[in-house]
Image (spheres, rainbow, N blue to C red):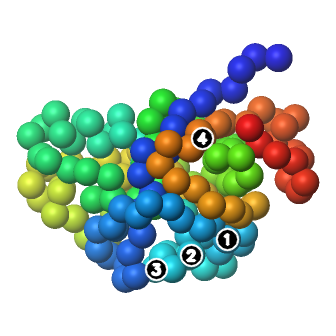
Amino acid sequence: MAESPAGRIEAVSFSQRKGEKKSNIEKGRLLAGRGLEGDAHAGDWHRQLSLLAMESIAKIRERGLAVNPGDFAENITTSGIRLWELKPGTRLGLGKRVLLEVTQIGKECHSRCAIFHQVGDCVMPREGIFARVLRGGMIRPGDTIRVLPPEEAEVVTGAVIG
């Protein structure tokens, strides 16, 4: 069996209010069917979590803007996986226990953010992804993130992802 694509969690971020940059935290608890505990976007809907790759953030940095994880209001910043190439329905394993399902790639930008006004572009609407939490647990920077092959992704309960 071919090795599934793997990367790493670079940052975990949250905010208590919608529409603002997120603050980086040492670790976060993901709740099944809800999202990141305490985050403004957590709830019973299809966009419980947002993820953005450092590779996407680097594109804005190359344009001269000093942006960091959380500045695009993403909950999880990753490296090593081309998130924007994933399809809805793809399952992701985070750390040893957490299981996510990708629900949406990109989003409509209703109002231009400060980053867009400064550099004329923002990567989140095109390259950010959204997911729901199928199995919760603790995550932290340095944990692995893997794209799960279909046969492994079908086992939702009781399995240890590693």
Q: Could you say whether the residue bearing mark 4 is in a helix, strand or loop?
A: strand
> Which of pointers 1 and 3 indicates the residue nearer the eye?
1
Q: Which residue is mark 3?
A: 40
Label number found at residue 37: 2
Task: Mark 2 and mark 1 in contact? Answer it, CB < 8 Å.
Answer: yes
Q: Earlier in the sequence, mark 3 or mark 4?
A: 3
Task: State the residue at coordinates (18%, 57%).
Answer: 115
Label number found at residue 82: none
Could you tell me which quadrant the N terminus lies in?
A: top right
Q: Is residue 124 above or below residue 146?
A: below
Task: State the residue at coordinates (52%, 54%).
Answer: 140
Q: Is residue 99 left or right of residue 62?
A: right
Q: Could you say whether the residue bearing mark 3 is in a helix, strand or loop?
A: loop
Determine the image quadrant of residue 25.
bottom left
Q: Earlier in the sequence, mark 1 or mark 3?
A: 1
Q: Which residue is mark 1?
A: 31
Q: Amino acid at mark 1?
A: Leu
Q: Amino acid at mark 3?
A: Ala
